[in-house]
Amino acid sequence: MKSAVLAFAAASLTLATPLAAQAQTVPAACPVKAENIVSNDGLSRARAAVREGRLTVLAMGSSSIEGIGASRRELGFVPLLEQGLRERLPGVEITVVNKGIGGETAKETADRLEREIVASRPDLVLWQLGTNDVLRDRSMDDFFADFRRGQGVLDEAGVDVVLIDPQRLPDNARNPAFQGRNPALSEISRLIALEGGRVGYGVQHRFAAMSGWSGLDRGGVGPDDLHLNDPGYACWSANTAEGLAAALR
């Protein structure tokens, strides 16, 4: 009986290994570079947490944080980021909390930042913002008013912050709602980077990084012309893990 149990356990491990490896696969066409994240000297709390052997990250934003477009939950951004950070920061207990809600603008995220921070008690908050504000044609005045309201909550909580700018949409988007949107997404990304530098938040230049994803299927974006596909999530999570690990070591 004991040998049968051991054989079953070994078989289970053999079956599990390919699934784990599949979840970690980064497309060969994906350039993974730490330079996509700029710390702006704003990650001291997260660095201290890493030195103590544990790090809690709260991921806030809309559908790409939630993981919409991935074929399986474990192939979305947050599970892959958590896995990637564990690989790059061995010995550190990593927790990445997924609080993405599809369709949110900066306003809705700012509205719930305080309660999510209280619930998760993070060292670091990733705030993905800007895409839905552009797609809904919100004014930049309204966008930055919501950003500064969220900034007040973040600063009061004393957490570190990395802002994640919008994704790049396919240049050949078939959905008329998304055609010609990249110039506006590029501009709000530029403004987010300037604001992050001004207030001392880290910034991930996701839009710029995705310009180099031409080797991925549809540039990492799925058939709806908006949400990332599995290769896109794998590429983005690997770049995020690489950039964060380099900044936090």
Image: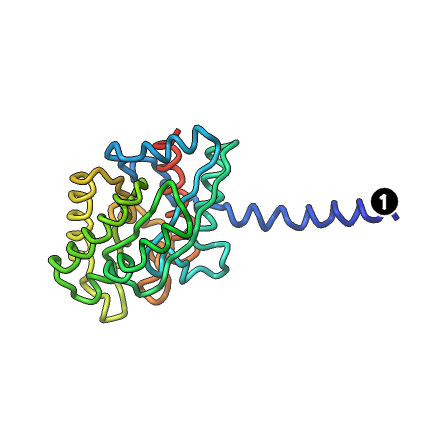
Q: Residue at x 34, y 32 (%)?
A: 247
Horizontal and vertical percent for residue 38? 26, 36
Q: Report whether 112 appears left or right of 13.
A: left
* Helix, strand or loop at mark 1: helix
Counting other residues with Cα less than 10 Å from the Cα at mark 1, is it few (<14), some (14-19), or many (20 or more)?
few
Horizontal and vertical percent for residue 178? 23, 66
Horizontal and vertical percent for residue 66? 40, 59
- Which corner quadrant holds the C terminus? top left
Q: Residue at x 69, y 46 (%)?
A: 13
Marker count (numbered): 1
Quadrant of residue 61 within the rendered picture: bottom left
Give the amino acid at mark 1.
Answer: Ser
Q: Residue at x 26, y 48 (%)?
A: 211
Q: Report whether 91 appears left or right of 35.
A: right
Along the line of sight, the residue nearer the viewer: 100 or 87: 100
Is residue 138 depicted above or below 13 in this figure?
Answer: below
Q: Residue at x 31, y 58 (%)?
A: 112
**Which residue is the site of mark 1?**
3
* Residue 171 visible in the picture: no
Is residue 159 depicted above or below 107 in this figure?
Answer: above
Is residue 172 depicted above or below 6 in this figure?
Answer: below
| Colour convention of the picture | rainbow
Horizontal and vertical percent for residue 146? 19, 57
Q: Report whether 206 appears left or right of 249.
A: left
* Residue 50 visible in the picture: yes
Along the line of sight, the residue nearer the viewer: 34 or 211: 34
